[in-house]
Image (spheres, rainbow, N blue to C red):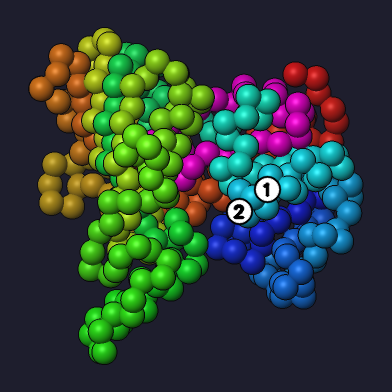
Amino acid sequence: MGYRVAVVGATGAVGREMLNILEELEFPVDKIHAIASRKSIGLEVGWKDGVIKCEDVAQFDFSTVDVVLMSVSGSFSKEWAPKIGAAGPIVIDNSSAWRMDPDVPLIVPEVNPDAVALARRKNIIANPNCSTAQLVVALKPLHDAARIKRVVVSTYQSVSGAGSEGMDELWNQTKGVFVLGAPPPSVFPKQIAFNVIPYIGEFRDDGYTDEEAKMWNETHKMIDPDIALTVTCVRVPVMVGHSEAVNIEFHEPLDEDDARDILRESPGVLVIDKRDPTGYITPKEAQGEHAVYVSRIRNDTTVKHGLSMWVVSDNLRKGAALNAVQIAQLLADRGLIGRKVLA
């Protein structure tokens, strides 16, 4: 049996990737709709061997579809996700709007699949922040083995996390440096070409940014609220692919060799960890791939039970579009699409 699927925000980078991954994973689609704002009506996006035209979100009848994949702004989702859910389909939302709502499950299928049982409370499921998604895929099996006490994370986040405008800004500044000088920043607060920016999101009163707070709040919701987690989020001049340097302190002993073996058997993880000059994964190599890659696993001898590791993934895929489609697969596998289930 196939499903009637709508992708809202189909003209954006993540929306287009959602369409690609629906095809790649052979999700059973009987009918597909590309939905966007009025200004994008009639624009064509790729679907399988052809194209489909975008339809107006304000005019579309969402009662005619079973599941909606949404990649839009938080404010847009706040307005539209409840309306769409009330029409019947389950909304899988990629924005930050619903992640911490207690009646909305926040799901990474490899980490907390059973949370899908709450899907019908509001007919909305939240996708986590792109950096959180890859982090929790790597942390969960280690937490199950030795109980994580504290995590320190430094992110190296690509410009695609800021959308196509961020990618354009890096490209234009990089070209400009060698010609007439880099154009002034408009998407990022400072020049991103040949630079790094230790600031993503907006500052909070405690000096952290909301991007950093998302990572610990979402990790607490999906894995364990007792994990102490501190983060520094950094934008780097990479087009696609987020990287993270992760230091973990455990309650119980866990040797690097045991951790390596555990991660090799964990869903969604690929361990590439050879101690030679090329024995690790970079964001360039992760681009276009589905896995969360873990490299440079090593004991941290400065604490009683500690490990350090390097985590890389394609943020447009596992950090967004792929995770959304995997949630749809999870719903289908558990028979939760198209009928009401009481949580």
Disc marking residue 18 = none
Q: Which mark is residue 77?
A: 1
262 and 296: which is toward the camera: 296
Q: Residue at x 87, y 61 (%)?
A: 59
Query: Which quadrant: the N terminus?
Result: top right
Q: Position of residue 335 (x, y in %)?
A: 77, 29
Q: Main secondary structure of the magenta part?
A: helix
Give left or right: position of 75 versus 179.
right
Taking the spot 75% from the left edge, 31% from the top edge, the residue there is 122
Q: Please, what is the three-letter code of the amino acid marked with disc 1?
A: Ser
Q: Nearer the viewer, residue 179 or 280?
A: 179
Dividing the picture into quadrants, the one containing residue 298 is top left
Q: Position of residue 220 (x, y in %)?
A: 46, 24
Q: Is residue 210 above or below residue 173?
A: above
Which segment did they paint magenta? Answer: 111-137
User: Which residue ends up furthest to the bottom in the rendered image?
Assistant: 180
CB under 8 Å between discs 2 and 1? yes
Mark 2: amino acid:
Ser
Disc sitting over residue 73 in the figure: 2
In this view of the protein, can residue 242 be seen by the observer? yes
- SS for tag 2? loop
Q: Residue furthest front?
A: 205
User: Residue 191 appears in which quarter of the rendering?
Assistant: bottom left
Q: Indicate the secondary structure of the residue bearing disc 1.
A: helix
